[in-house]
Image (spheres, rainbow, N blue to C red):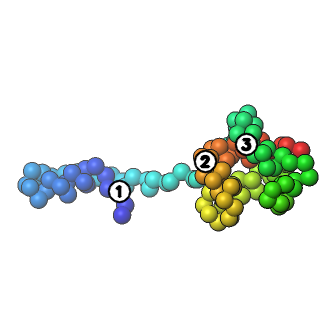
Amino acid sequence: MRPQPLAACLLAVLAPLGAVAHAAPATSPPAPATAPAATAPSGNFDNGRVLAYTCQGCHGITGYKNAYPSYKVPKIGGQSVEYLTQALTEYRQGKRRHPTMQAQSMSFSEQEIADLAVYLSTVK
């Protein structure tokens, strides 16, 4: 439904009551409101560095192999911002399954995910 000018709305409400004898027609309809484009938040490098401290517990292991339980840990340092953002978002949405990563990602806001992605993309 298209938004109506204020005069048209008042006319529609007051006319049945007999309160309005005459209302001037609107000169031109208002331009349709455009929804702002959804943009991803831009990341803050310094905040990402602070947040990434918890990532080091698993992803900072030499050789990227966890001792117990034994499994390979993906290398996240140097990955692209897009990949890191997508991975954390998909863990948070339940599209990727790993209990620890799902719990970690649930604790981050969209802004914090962007911050982490910006920082981690620069780590060698």
**SS type, badge 1:** loop
Q: CA distance from mark 3 to mark 1?
A: 49 Å
Separation of residues labelled 1 and 2 (CA atoms): 39 Å
- Element under label 2? loop
Q: Are marks 3 and 1 in contact (CB under 8 Å)?
A: no
Which residue corresponds to the image point at 65% horizontal and 57% vertical from the top-left? 102
Q: Earlier in the sequence, mark 1 or mark 2?
A: 1
In the image, residue 86 lies at what x, y percent? Answer: 70, 58
Q: x, y percentage for residue 69?
A: 79, 59
- Of badges 1 and 2, nearer the viewer stands 2
| Image quadrant where one finds the C terminus | top right
Residue identified by numbered label 2: 107
Q: Which residue is mark 3?
A: 54
For the residues labelled 3 and 2, the Cα–Cα distance comes to 12 Å
According to the image, label 1 marks what residue? Answer: 3
Q: Which image quarter holds the N terminus?
A: bottom left
Quarter holding residue 67: bottom right
Of marks 3 and 1, the one in the foreground: 3
- Residue at (68, 55) in percent of width and height: 100
Q: Position of residue 108 (x, y in %)?
A: 62, 47
**Residue at image point 81% right, 56% down:** 68
Does the CB distance between marks 1 and 2 fall below 8 Å?
A: no
Residue 40 visible, this orientation: no
Q: Amino acid at mark 2?
A: Ser
Residue type, numbered disc 1? Pro
* Residue 35 visible: yes
